């Protein structure tokens, strides 16, 4: 798909932002705002846009919602989604996303609220079931946005581990009842583990390593999750052996390596990884 003419973006984007900035407390208006932000998020998923066309307005929309809670869950996720996706291209947005608008805090809170909706019993009324289905969809979108956030980090701070720890707990809660959400989480962890900026020790402390060990021990029949397990431990083992964490103390590194490798050896994890690789090599 080729880039649209610049004239199209300079006309379309301001019009959508004008709709998105409407703060009237009316359900129909809220739906229009939701659709405008969803459309903007879709545009920004595919194209690099000059920050002058959107940044001030999106910051205003997010800040206003943080104070007044005026947006629908989907609208708010869409606003964050477009900003995080653009930050992968425009590094000057990092400070806005992380320090000014506090993405990590907001993502954890939104996922927590969505989890409550997803965990409601399915015997509820039709309208409540519809809301639960909507919550699952929005949760999947948040997981992809969190994944994009971690994949485009340029430096590491310990506070970033808090959200990963929350996602690991969420994965355990969703493992049996919501396999699609669980699968999206294992995929996100697998991809994040390949990004050198993400600390291996954080994966251990946040519970991600144990999560994958538990999955391997269960001998899952889900091909996609099996693939995620294989790729995660393939990357994880390499990074452990190559001391592939910048700025990590030698003592701390050896302690992490010893603890994790011992766990992997106890359940024959290396043998399992080798078997997985042979199976997939024969298929591909």
Image: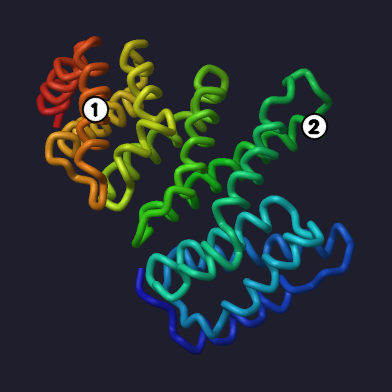
Residue ID at (50%, 80%): 51
Q: State the image coordinates of residue 209 (x, y, percent, origin top left).
A: 34, 27
Query: How far apart in space, not on screen, are marks 2 and 1 (Cα)?
Result: 38 Å
The single residue placed furthest to the bottom in the displayed view is 7
| Number of the label disc, if any, that sits on residue 230 | 1
Residue at the spot x=31%, y=31% of the render? 228
The image quadrant where one finds the C terminus is top left
Q: Which residue is mark 2?
A: 128
Instruction: Give the residue displayed 71% in from the left and 79% down from the top.
Output: 18
Image position, residue 246 (x, y; %): 23, 51
Up-down relation of residue 170 to residue 93 (above or below) = above
Q: How far across and down, in percent of the image, does residue 242 sit?
A: 12, 40
Residue 92 in which image quadrant: bottom left
Left or right: where does residue 273 sit relative to residue 219? left
SS label for mark 1:
helix
Q: Give the quarter of the image for residue 227.
A: top left
| Sequence-earlier tag: 2 or 1 | 2
């Amino acid at each position: 798909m080729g880039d649209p003419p610049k004239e199209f973006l300079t006309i379309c984007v301001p019009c959508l932002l004008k709709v998105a900035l409407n703060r009237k407390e009316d359900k129909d208006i809220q739906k229009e705002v939701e659709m405008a932000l969803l459309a903007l998020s879709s545009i920004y998923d595919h194209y690099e846009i000059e920050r002058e066309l959107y940044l001030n307005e999106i910051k205003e929309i997010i800040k206003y919602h943080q104070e007044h809670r005026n947006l629908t869950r989907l609208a708010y996720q869409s606003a964050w989604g477009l900003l995080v996706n653009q930050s992968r291209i425009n590094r000057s947005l990092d400070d806005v996303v992380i320090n000014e608008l506090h993405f990590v805090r907001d993502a954890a809170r939104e996922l927590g609220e969505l989890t409550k909706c997803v965990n409601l019993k399915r015997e509820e009324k039709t309208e409540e079931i519809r809301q639960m289905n909507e919550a699952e969809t929005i949760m999947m979108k948040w997981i992809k946005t969190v994944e994009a956030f971690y994949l485009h980090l340029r430096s590491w701070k310990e506070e970033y581990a808090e959200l990963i720890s929350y996602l690991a707990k969420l994965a355990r809660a969703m493992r049996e009842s919501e396999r699609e959400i669980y699968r999206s989480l294992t995929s996100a962890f697998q991809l994040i583990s390949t990004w050198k900026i993400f600390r291996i020790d954080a994966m251990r402390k946040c519970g991600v390593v144990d999560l994958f060990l538990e999955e391997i021990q269960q001998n899952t029949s889900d091909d996609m999750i099996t693939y995620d397990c294989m790729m995660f431990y393939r990357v994880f083992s390499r990074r452990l052996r190559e001391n592939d964490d910048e700025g990590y103390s030698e003592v701390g590194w050896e302690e992490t390596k010893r603890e994790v490798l011992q766990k992997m050896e106890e359940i024959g994890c290396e043998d399992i990884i080798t078997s997985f690789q042979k199976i997939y090599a024969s298929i591909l």
